[in-house]
Image: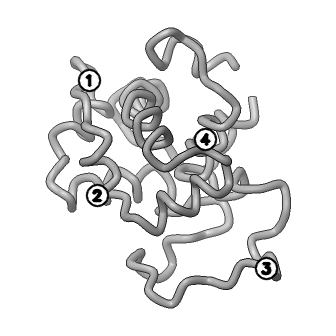
């Protein structure tokens, strides 16, 4: 896996967790197919601002969108610590779920086949290290750089 080695405690990222991280950060990792699947109608009450579901930007508009969502929910200090060069702060699974929103969590859980609670637990453990690895110089990379990290 290269870039993500030792990014999470235990150093082991399961395939469902990689799919979940890809869904948040790189939209095309949601599935191997196009986004418009006939059996999945878009939800009319999507709280995500228009334009943030770009085909390569993940459910929240990529890494920058994820960080903005966390900041908006009052978890800016934790999110900024992941990007910065110091110690990564943790985030509680329930806080992460509230920041991402139930619709996003439900969609990722369906795509990965994971239970929503287990998904949040694993994401809250993995995200600090993954974001830290994606931002080695304390700066958020361009979306294509994030995408290439998932393809290597």
Residue, disc 4:
145
How far is the residue under mark 3 from the one under mark 2?
A: 27 Å
Q: Which of pointers 1 and 4 indicates the residue nearer the eye?
A: 1
Q: Quadrant of the N terminus?
A: top right
How far is the residue under mark 1 from the one under mark 3?
A: 40 Å
Residue, disc 3:
39
Residue, disc 2:
98
Q: Quadrant of the C terminus?
A: top right
Q: Which of pointers 1 and 3 indicates the residue nearer the eye?
A: 3
Q: Quadrant of residue 34?
A: bottom right
Marked residue nearer the N-terminal end (1 or 2): 1
Residue, disc 1:
88
Q: Which of pointers 1 and 2 indicates the residue nearer the eye?
A: 2
How far is the residue under mark 1 from the one under mark 4?
A: 21 Å
Q: Is residue 108 above or below residue 50?
A: above
Q: Position of residue 101 (x, y in %)?
A: 37, 64
Number of numbered labels in the structure image: 4
How far is the residue under mark 1 from the one under mark 2?
A: 20 Å
How far is the residue under mark 3 from the one under mark 4?
A: 31 Å
Q: Is residue 151 above or below residue 71?
A: above
Dot 2 surroundings within 10 Å: few (below 14), some, or many (20 or more)?
some
Q: Position of residue 88 (x, y in %)?
A: 26, 23
**As drawn, is 29 to the left or to the right of 78?**
right
Residue at 48% over, 63% down = 104
Residue at 74% over, 71% down = 35
Which residue occupies the extreme bottom position in the image?
44
């Amino acid at each position: 896996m290269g870039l993500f080695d030792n990014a999470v405690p235990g150093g082991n990222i399961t395939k469902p967790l990689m799919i979940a991280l890809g869904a948040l950060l790189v939209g095309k990792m949601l599935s191997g197919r196009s986004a418009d699947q006939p059996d999945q109608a878009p939800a009319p009450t999507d709280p995500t601002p228009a334009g943030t579901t770009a085909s390569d930007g993940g459910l929240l508009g990529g890494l920058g969108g994820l960080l903005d969502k966390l900041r908006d929910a009052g978890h800016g200090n934790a999110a900024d610590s992941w990007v910065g060069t110091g110690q990564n702060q943790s985030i509680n699974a329930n806080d992460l779920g509230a920041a991402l929103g139930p619709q996003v969590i439900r969609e990722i859980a369906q795509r990965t086949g994971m239970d929503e609670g287990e998904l949040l637990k694993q994401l809250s453990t993995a995200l600090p290290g993954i974001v830290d690895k994606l931002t080695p110089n304390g700066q958020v990379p361009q979306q294509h750089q994030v995408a290439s990290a998932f393809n290597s």
